[in-house]
Amino acid sequence: MRDRIEAGILKNLFFFWSNTVPCRVYGKIFYDEPVIYVFWHCKMFGLIKLMRRRGIYVLASKHRDGEKIVQIVKNYGYRFVRGSTSRGGISALKEIVRLLRSGKQIAFTPDGPRGPRWKFQEGAFFASKITGIPLVFVGVGYSRKIVLPTWDLFEIPLPFSRCVVYSSLPYRLKEGDTVQKMEELLTQYTLRAEAIANGKI
């Protein structure tokens, strides 16, 4: 009951708060074909409303935090695959592969659900490698923000601040690509978004 109350409060706060922070997108972010979106866990606030109602499947953990996220964003048209690298990982990966092969799009936070922060875990990499579906690296930056004392240092943009989304073209894995390289690419796009948001570029 307590979790439901907290989720309800957070859902309403997000609705009103997010309306004060429109995001400017650099690069193409929406595609008709299946892709795998990847972005760091701490950056999801700026993407929830932007990518709504496109039928995107989101990997959500079975932890309490994952359930809260589901309750907050389910009204925005997202669908969910429950699991993570620590709980239900294999079954979740199999379901993601099935969905990608059927033409669906998937969103990953590759450092979730428990970190380490900005450490690219293997789920999105394996899903792309198995299916041949490309990754889209999505960096997010805010001009002014609150940083929460969570494992990922979750970021909430302040009202009327700038939100920048910097997106890559679809990236198909090549022979020799590694998880480490994916981590470096996502970090590059994220730092680029942060630099634009803060007027450094």
Image (cartoon, grey):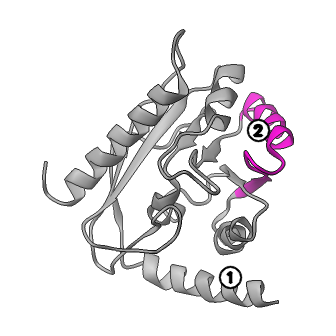
Give above or below for 130 relative to 137: above
Which quadrant would residue 141 be assigned to in this image? bottom left
Residue 22 spot, x, y in % from top left:
36, 68
Q: Residue at x 65, y 20 (%)?
A: 132
Element assignment for label 1: helix
Label 2 Cα crowd, 10 Å radius (few <14 / some 14-19 / many 20+) = many
Give above or below for 26 relative to 178: below
Which quadrant would residue 91 be assigned to in this image? top right
Element assignment for label 2: helix
If you read the primary sequence from the N terminus, does the residue marked by circle 1 or circle 2 appear first?
1
Left-right relation of 33 to 102: left
Residue 33 spot, x, y in % from top left:
61, 32
Give above or below for 48 relative to 29: below
Residues in magenta, as a range: 79-103
Please tell me the numbered disc located at residue 7. Answer: 1
Label 1 Cα crowd, 10 Å radius (few <14 / some 14-19 / many 20+) = many
- Check whether the beta carbons of the residues at disc 1 and disc 2 lie within 8 A of each other: no
- Residue 30 belongs to the span the image colors magenta: no
- Residue 89 belongs to the span the image colors magenta: yes
Left-right relation of 56 to 119: right
Residue type of the residue flagged with mark 2: Ile
Query: What residue does disc 2 label?
Result: 96
Residue type of the residue flagged with mark 1: Ala
* Residue found at the very far top of the displayed protein: 175
Count of marks, rendered view: 2
Between the C-alphas of marks 1 and 2, the distance is 26 Å
Residue 200 spot, x, y in % from top left:
13, 53
Q: Residue at x 49, y 48 (%)?
A: 39
Which quadrant would residue 34 be assigned to in this image? top right
Give above or below for 59 relative to 198: above
Residue 99 spot, x, y in % from top left:
78, 37
